[in-house]
Amino acid sequence: MNRFTPMLAGHWSTLRRSTTARMAGLATLALALLSFFEIDDALGQLWQAHTTPAQIRERSIWLPNYQFVERLHLPGIQENASDIIYIAERKSYFVAVNGPPQLYEYSEDFALKAHYDLQGFEDTEALAYDGNGNLLIGEERRQSVVTLPLSQLDRPIVRSELGNLIIATKADNNRGLEGMAFDPASQVLFASREQRPMRLFEVAGAVQPSNAMVYQAAVSTLGVQRLRMDDVSAMHYDLQSRHLLVLSDESQLLAELDSGYYPISFMDLEAGFNGLDQDVPQAEGVTLGPQRELLIVSEPNLLYRYRLKEE
């Protein structure tokens, strides 16, 4: 060993530590840039498009085919818009407000048609339609579903006069029933518990007569391991594809699931995806309209409209 060996060893050790620190810093910066530009999400959408067979895409809603076209304020609503459903028989959209509990009816171009007070309701977070004249209204904390015949919209809507069923025990943490969707063919209601724990349910016998009886229903709990979501804020069942749309506010994501609850397609609700110019702030409701346009309700009173891209 010559007299320069300790000096060289020390210099090499310092250089190695410096290089390691620089590499760690670059790695951290790279991850931050990936997160900032959402490159991982963009690559995920590209991978999804290239690996899904054409026949599956054609039979699906296929969310990558949608393009953002319009954002508007819902007339008459100031805050707390919580869900949306389209009912073809009335050529109307219905939007629920959770506090105070109210129901708004809009034309297909979102002119306000009517406003209904929901007397005795609490935390009205979810809407579904049974295809047979009944609007289903979900209450989050009570975790109950109230059946409202559309024929009764011309008189006061009083909860104690309507049939309702209990899906689960009362949720005291405001993380209860958050989303609903209905399949008229099977007469099954799909329902979601928002989180803590996040759950999906299948409910048989959800539609009840319009009287003051309380019903229990057959409830099946579904696994949600395949969903890369932090919560479930809304759902919609598509009769054409027989697929389920599942919306997540916290994950800023909309997912399409097939009949086996396997994810088929996704839509990111952040700026830069599907033509969106800014993030959707708090996505609370989703439905498909008469021309298969996609509509998302966001608090406090925003509506986001997507249309299929022209080929």
Image (spheres, grey):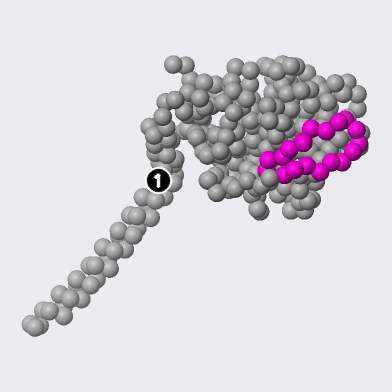
- Inspect the magenta stretch and tell me whether residue 209 lies in it: yes
Location of the N terminus (image quadrant): bottom left
Q: Position of residue 200 (x, y in %)?
A: 65, 44
Of helix, strand and loop, which one carries label 1? helix
> Mark 1 is on which residue type?
Leu
Q: Position of residue 14 (x, y in %)?
A: 24, 71
In this view of the protein, which residue sits in the foreground, 51 or 76?
51
In the image, residue 295 above or below residue 263: above
In this view of the protein, which residue sits in the foreground, 190 or 302?
190
Q: How many marks?
A: 1
Pointer 1: residues within 10 angstroms few (<14), some, or many (20+)? few
Q: Residue at x 51, y 25 (%)?
A: 59
| First to last magenta residue range | 201-219
Direction from residue 72 to residue 22 in the image, left or right = left
Residue 270 visible in the shown view: no
Q: Position of residue 169 (x, y in %)?
A: 78, 51
Q: Residue at x 60, y 38 (%)?
A: 247
In this view of the protein, which residue sits in the foreground, 275 or 165?
165
Location of the C terminus (image quadrant): top left
Q: Residue at x 24, y 67 (%)?
A: 16
Q: Which residue is mark 1?
A: 34
In the image, residue 169 above or below residue 303: below
Q: Position of residue 286 (x, y in %)?
A: 64, 31
